[in-house]
Image (cartoon, helix red, strand yellow):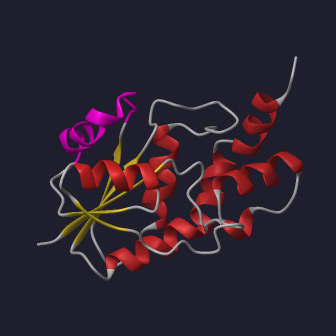
Amino acid sequence: MKRGFYVGRFQPYHNGHQTVLKHIAGKVDEIIIGVGSAQLSHQVDNPFTAGERVLMITRSLHDLGCPCYVIPIEDIQRNALWVAHVRSMAPPFDICYSSNPLVVQLFRDAGIKVQSPAMYERDLLSGTEIRNRMLAGKSWEKLVPPEVVQVIKEIDGVKRLRQIARED
């Protein structure tokens, strides 16, 4: 049994994440998805709650063909201890998948194998780009799975983002 770990903020979960997870699903028996910065929400860079992000991800994984566990992981603000914190919150895993240089370094320092999957259309498929489009009233829906569009509409997420982005 080979289990992989993939972490991100998923603000929001988008088609780039989905593509990476489809790639990972072909290499492992199970995937643990860590929802990072789980304590953050209602901020321009982090508008969605951990629970909302878990819902976005879980609804989008129905055809992945690989069991997935979605685990919220709060920041502890101590990089030297972060991998131990992750390991205490998640089921055991054999390999970490990340292209984030800090995450790669921290897991390698802890003796855990890391692979950096290719990022898919990174300039277009990023949480920053999607949030900017939401703020500007531009089309964003095709950049995320349909299930994510549904969740964002259910929670009135675009309205929330615009409200918290307003200045006094």
Magenta region includes residue 68:
no
> In terms of depth relative to the viewer, which is nearer, 8 or 112?
112
Name the outermost residue toward the top: 168
Tell me the quadrant of the picture where the C terminus can be found. Answer: top right
> In terms of depth relative to the viewer, which is nearer, 16 or 113?
113
Please state the total of marks drawn on the protein image. 0
Q: Is residue 71 above or below residue 44?
A: below
Image point 70% across, 66% down: which residue?
123
Q: Is residue 67 left or right of residue 91?
A: right
Q: Is residue 158 above or below residue 120?
A: above
Image point 79% across, 32% down: which residue?
165
Name the outermost residue toward the bottom: 26
Q: Is residue 125 left or right of residue 32?
A: right
Q: Is residue 114 visible?
A: yes
Image point 72% across, 67% down: which residue?
124
Q: Predominant secondary structure in magenta?
A: helix
Q: Residue 74 appears at what percent x and percent y?
A: 38, 33
Q: Is residue 62 left or right of residue 31?
A: right
Q: Which residues are magenta?
A: 74-90
Q: Residue 25 appears at what percent x and percent y?
A: 33, 76
> In terms of depth relative to the viewer, which is nearer, 140 or 105?
105
Image point 54% across, 71% down: which residue?
119
Magenta region includes residue 75:
yes
Name the outermost residue toward the left: 1
Q: Residue 163 appears at what percent x and percent y?
A: 80, 30
Tell me the quadrant of the picture where the N terminus can be found. Answer: bottom left
Q: Is residue 63 visible?
A: no
Q: Residue 104 appears at what percent x and percent y?
A: 36, 56
Q: Is residue 78 above or below residue 107?
A: above
Q: Is residue 10 left or right of residue 106?
A: right
